[in-house]
């Protein structure tokens, strides 16, 4: 319970990685505001698990594409908690709202990605900073490969948005450094939660064959640790960044991917892994 008495807001806290993060922080004594968009049953379930872990909290509805919703969400956090110690920015709209190839991109799809990541993190961090105690933690959940590569064509809007999100981490890290507030990004690799559970995550919405192919790809060696990630792996990294011992880590993007991000895509794995 080393974070006893701290208060956190987790956007996207109702499901997936956000839910695992809410439970991890609650298990360590943190009061948790669980943000959701449409799925109030999932948010209530997360809150009930938070309470079973002996922590307190509340649920808060917001569409992070809407600036006024972001303001209302932080007002509610201020009213209920008085202040804030941890802000985890994890909400991401459903894939269908932003999934489009570059040459067919519409402004609606573009905005769903950019506004949910870049704009929401810009406004959210400004609001968080205004009620955050010195020494707080701001953590953005990103997906770095999508901002660095260009091969997953319909992910272009989200990839561009995640690149902007990561850039904002660095600028805010400088802006808030003198208050001892750290700002970092966590980049999970492929994350599969339990199928048909609230922690399943976005990739559980892929067709079963695509899920199996993705899992096999990582287990066969693309991820050196030969497994895909779990929501709890990511939640564990959030917890690490919240430790007081992490107080000098800021402006960084931390990969939580079993080593997938250090693989070389230039030649086949069987050559890279061959004997000398
Ligand atoms: N899963 C992965 O493999 C993976 C890998 C790398 C990075 N990430 C990142 O990790 C984060 C969480 O991903 P996930 O797959 O675990 O999430 P998820 O299970 O798909 O859950 C999405 C969350 O975002 C909320 N949400 C959706 N649209 C929203 C909107 N317009 N405004 C506010 N909230 C909204 C949802 O609320 P409702 O429950 O109300 O719908 C839900 O809490 C994302 O930022 C994602 O990019 C995920």
Image (tube, rainbow, N blue to C red):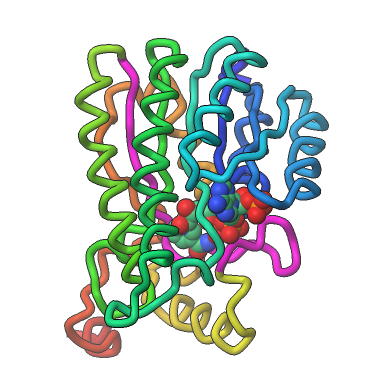
Query: Up-down: is 71 above or below 201?
Result: above
Asked whether residue 187 is drawn in magenta, I would say yes
The magenta segment: 180-202
Location of residue 98 in the rendering, given as x and y in whole percent from the top left corner: 45, 67
Location of residue 241 in the rendering, given as x and y in whole percent from the top left corner: 42, 32
Magenta span: chief secondary structure: loop
**Could you say which quadrant of the image residue 53 lies in?**
top right
> Quarter holding the C terminus?
bottom left
Query: Up-down: is 260 above or below 176?
Result: below
Location of residue 245 in the rendering, given as x and y in whole percent from the top left corner: 38, 22
Asked whether residue 127 is drawn in magenta, I would say no
Query: Up-down: is 127 above or below 225?
Result: above
Q: Nearer the viewer, residue 24 or 39?
A: 39
Location of residue 107 in the rendering, given as x and y in whole percent from the top left corner: 36, 65
Q: Quadrant of ligand 1?
A: bottom right
Residue pictured at 23% horizontal, 79% vertical: 265
């Amino acid at each position: 319970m080393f974070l006893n008495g701290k208060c956190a807001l987790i956007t996207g806290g109702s499901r997936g990685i956000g839910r695992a993060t809410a439970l991890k922080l609650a298990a360590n004594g943190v009061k948790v505001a669980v943000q959701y968009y449409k799925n109030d049953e999932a948010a209530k379930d997360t809150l009930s698990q938070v309470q079973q872990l002996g922590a307190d909290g509340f649920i808060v509805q917001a569409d992070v594409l809407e600036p006024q919703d972001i303001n209302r969400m932080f007002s509610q956090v201020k009213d209920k908690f008085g202040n804030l110690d941890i802000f985890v920015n994890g909400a991401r709209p459903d894939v269908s709202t932003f999934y489009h190839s570059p040459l067919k991109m519409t402004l609606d799809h573009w905005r769903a990605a950019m506004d949910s990541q870049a704009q929401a993190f810009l406004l959210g961090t400004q609001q968080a900073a205004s009620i955050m105690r010195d020494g707080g933690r701001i953590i953005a959940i990103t997906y770095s490969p999508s901002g660095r590569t260009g091969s997953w064509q319909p992910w272009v809007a989200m990839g561009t948005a995640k690149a902007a999100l990561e850039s904002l981490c660095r600028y805010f890290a400088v802006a808030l450094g003198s208050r001892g507030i750290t700002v970092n990004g966590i980049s999970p690799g492929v994350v599969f939660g339990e199928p048909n559970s609230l922690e399943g995550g976005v990739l559980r919405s892929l067709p079963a064959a695509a899920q199996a192919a993705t899992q096999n790809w990582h287990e066969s060696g693309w991820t050196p640790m030969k497994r895909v990630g779990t929501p709890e792996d990511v939640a564990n990294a959030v917890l690490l960044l919240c430790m007081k011992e992490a107080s000098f880590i800021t402006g960084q993007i931390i990969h939580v991917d079993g080593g997938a991000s250090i693989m070389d895509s230039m030649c086949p794995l069987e050559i890279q892994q061959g004997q000398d």
